[in-house]
Image (spheres, grey):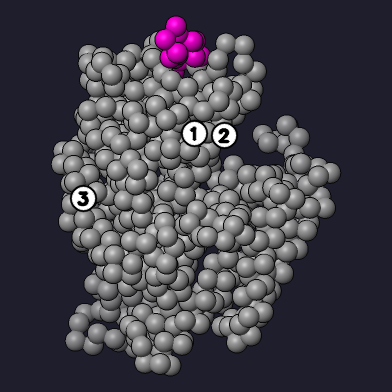
Amino acid sequence: MQYQAPANDLRFLLFDVLGADKLHELEKYADATPDLISAVIDEAGKLASEVIQPTNQIGDRQGCSYDPETKSVKTPDGFKEAYQKFVEGGWTALDAPLEFGGQGLPHTLKFVVDEMVCSTNLSLGMYPGLTHGAISALYAHGSEELKQTYLEKLISGEWTGTMCLTEPQCGTDLGLIRTKATPNDDGSYAIEGTKIWITGGEHDLVDNIVHLVLAKLPGAPDTTKGISLFVVPKFLPDSGERNPAFCGGLEHKMGIKGSATCVMNFEGAKGWLVGEPNKGMSAMFTMMNEARLMVGMQGLGLAEMAYQESLAFARERLQSRSLSGPKNPNGPADAIIVHPDVRRMLMRQKVLNEGMRALALFTGHQLDLSVAHPDESVRENADDLVQLLTPVVKAFLTDEGYNNANWGQQVLGGSGFTQDWPLEQLVRDGRIARIYEGTNGIQAMDLVGRKLSLKGGQLVRALFAELTGYLKDNPEAPYREELKVALKSLEQATMWLAQNAPKDPEQAGAAATPYLRIMALTVIGYLWSRMAGVAGQQLQLGEGNKPLLEGKQVSARYYFEKLMPEVDWLLKDIQTGKDSLMAFEDEHWVA
């Protein structure tokens, strides 16, 4: 089926719930009027369904191909043309800085576009997606000379960017990297080493690829505190000379086959330092945090496409009769959408997808406030929320996005297991999102190990203030009591960690994943309460899209009745501690 952008839901969230229609009142985003935001939603939806989606299946069937003679990579048929249309439409420049050719629009709009692109071809969307992170890292940490050299062409989409972290012997523990950077006489550095799993490391979409590479300078500490960041182009911008940064082969993957995932060999390639020596991790985190939010949108995008496909199938597939009597008396059977168990799977998809979209756009809106609001205290509070919620968006949206793609496949039954339908590809493509940019377990550890203690606990206090303020200011809020119970569980879990984690770090490790889920479910509950409240007000006034508004009220009820109770056993999981988890001795595993 052809993808249908969730335009009505996006407008409801952005304009009626989050207040993003007022972003144009901020000087930085003066151009972001409601009319412009609506135009972006409509045009991005059209691009996704008409240009990007037709390349998805062929990208999966063909994959990328590697030529060992030329060390070059060819992308699947249609990718180059679709990418060019993406570039010509100015989508690579949407929220990029104005001074280097960007449009300077709110980050929230990029979240919207990311979801649509990932719904229709995740593999293709990764090429410009990681480029955007390279833009942000260079803009925040690069010298003026590096900015002038690279940013305009990256922002225009004429060049693409990569992030080169992982090596054969190390993944998350980047202190173990062996790539070396040796100073040259001209102020550049000779980069030597091998990186693996490099998205877009080599391809034929553009003429030049700009690698951001982590490496160690001579004499640097042999830990993460000894890592520096370098920009290493495929072709040197001043001379056009080929830099010895070569693709050594493609990874063979279960999904995202249209995305070139490369082994990259840097054979004395010329690079330039980004930021300060031995401060590469802080510079790279600018790119990584942005990538983590983008990966969250990947999970949501695939889940949305899976929902649309499984809903269409359930409405048409005839099988058995309704338990309450025939709904299609003139046909041989009823559509399977009448069956409660099919409804269970569809409702879980729909309600979680809309809740996850609300969480993502809430975070995106806070990101925009953190950089554009004139009040410093508002900016700081918004930034605190963004930092806290970034691992939550990445982990929860990819966990539940993948689960929802699986539920969509289940709705199709045997058809879902075949390549005649797109669900099996969506499931395969979505699996990686829970792994890369830091596994979801790492995201949970980042949340409990770093984010909770930052600024003396200020980040999590900002979230508690947001939620308690809402409850105080809205005594008639829908599902107020259920939200209060969930918030109390989140507070109890936070207190348990504060009391136990400092004495035993393994307690924090054991509690991390359930804690992240409690936070995600509670914040989404807060947003569902807001959505239900706005829907109720608009229905009373006779305004808005009645089916959408009534659907929001039913969906909120489903969320609080069927999904929010998970918080109860997650809290018990945390409070019972690590003992049963860590009790096995080595011989117990194979007894």
Q: Which residues are magenta?
A: 180-196
Q: Is residue 174 left or right of residue 15?
A: right
Q: Which residue is mark 1?
A: 141
Task: Report the quarter where the N terminus lies.
Answer: bottom left
Q: Bin the neighbour count of mark 2 within 10 Å (Cα to Cα): few under 14, some 14-19, many 20 and up.
A: some
Residue 359, given in percent of the width and then of the height, sits at 50, 62
Give the alpha-carbon distance from disc 1 to disc 2, as whole Å. 9 Å
Q: Which residue is mark 2?
A: 282
The amino acid on which the numbered mark 1 sits, given as a three-letter code, is: His
Residue depicted at x 24% and y 55%: 48
Give the alpha-carbon distance from disc 1 to disc 3, as whole Å. 28 Å
Q: Residue 89, labelled with which disc? A: 3
Q: Pointer 1 and pointer 3: residues touching (CB < 8 Å)?
A: no
Mark 1 or 3, closer to the camera: 1
User: Would you identify the image quadrant in which residue 349 lies?
Assistant: bottom left
Residue depicted at x 54% and y 67%: 524
Mark 1 or 2, closer to the camera: 1
Please report whichever mark, 1 or 2, sits nearer to the chain's N-terminal start.
Answer: 1
Q: Bin the neighbour count of mark 1 within 10 Å (Cα to Cα): few under 14, some 14-19, many 20 and up.
A: many
